[in-house]
Image (cartoon, rainbow, N blue to C red):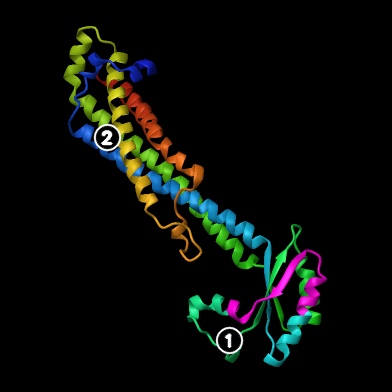
Amino acid sequence: MISPDLRNLLRGDKRADRVVPPTGYTAHLTLFVAGAMAFLAVFALALSLASGRIADRWASELAGAATLRINAPAEQRAAQTEAALTVLSQTPGVASARALTQEEQAALLAPWFGPGLPLDTLPVPQLIEIIETEPGIDVAGLRLRLGAEVPGAVLDDHTRWREPLVDAAMSLRRLGWISILLIGGATAAMITLAANASLAANAQIIEVLRLVGARDGFIAGAFVRRFTYRAFFGASVGTLLGMTGVLMLPEASESGGFLAGVGFQGKDWALPVLIPILGAMVAFFATWAAARRKLKELS
């Protein structure tokens, strides 16, 4: 049984370090893979965290709001708007209700029709913004009353399009975490291949070490230590570059859209620091497993 001592791994052993060549294609491969995967992991983590924040914000903001649309002829629109406001003021669960001004409605339509839209010449319905209390409103009962007293009123509680938006954001969040797991698996596979190649290339040296009394734990520890340090260094560089790239992304804003909110906020900046540590742990266990198998084959 091969059991490299973790304390010896961290302390280092100059004699064992001579077993593994400090340079070569396996060293370059380990550094590149660890750096590239850490770089991708930073962006996957940023996407996952941003998607979670967006899903929580959409769920909280849209859950307590509704919109009432008054579809009526121009000469009846004002009267039906007043009647709708009266009904809403008497409805349990409604914290406030107000009719949007023409300027506010024009601002809502500006992204699609441009500024300066002449609402007074277009059959644009009157919108009423409804803010709900914590228990919410009885949507079915309110619709029945509005249908009887305000024929042109159409209530939209945002459920029809709120849930798909939240589900989409949560799916992106899950996709980000799945990507991180796949990145970890790909890193382990590539480091395992590099460790196997290095062990095979040093088969003669390993045989000589065994002849002079070196134990398999000593030999495996040399490979584990070397590949773990390489993975940690490469992942540190990749994480630093990834965090720099995330820092250069546009900040979240109302006009910036979804991609403007991708990034880290507050304590989230501490999470990428764990990536090099996790990368080193992946390299440790992957190399240890590869060394155990390969040394058994060479016995």
Q: Check disc 2 and report the residue beneath it.
A: 30
Mark 2 surroundings: few (<14), some (14-19) or many (≥20) residues within 10 A:
many
Mark 1 touching mark 2, by CB under 8 A?
A: no
Kindly report which numbered mark, 1 or 2, lies closer to the viewer in this rendering. Answer: 1
Which quarter of the image is occupied by the N terminus? top left
Residue 119, disc: 1
Q: Is residue 251 above or below residue 227?
A: below
- The image shows residue 264 at horizontal and vertical percentages of 46, 48
- The image shows residue 294 at horizontal and vertical percentages of 28, 23
Amino acid on which disc 2 is placed:
Thr
In the picture as drawn, the residue positioned furthest to the top comes out as: 213
Instruction: Indicate whether residue 89 is drawn in magenta.
Output: yes
| Numbered disc 2: secondary structure | helix
Amino acid on which disc 1 is placed:
Leu
In the picture as drawn, the residue positioned furthest to the right comes out as: 90
Residue 190, disc: none
Nearest the viewer among 296 and 60 is: 60
| Numbered disc 1: secondary structure | helix
Q: Residue at x 44, y 56 (%)?
A: 251
Instruction: Determine which quarter of the picture holds residue 181.
Output: top left
Magenta part of the protein: which range? 84-105
- The image shows residue 155 at horizontal and vertical percentages of 70, 74
Q: Residue at x 49, y 81 (%)?
A: 113
Distance from label 1 to label 2 (Cα)? 63 Å
Nearest the viewer among 211 and 287 is: 287
60 sits to left or right of 201: right
Instruction: Determine which quarter of the picture holds residue 278.
Output: top left
Nearest the viewer among 281 and 185 is: 281
Count of numbered circles in the view: 2
Which quarter of the image is occupied by the C terminus? top left
Q: Is residue 280 above or below residue 175?
A: above
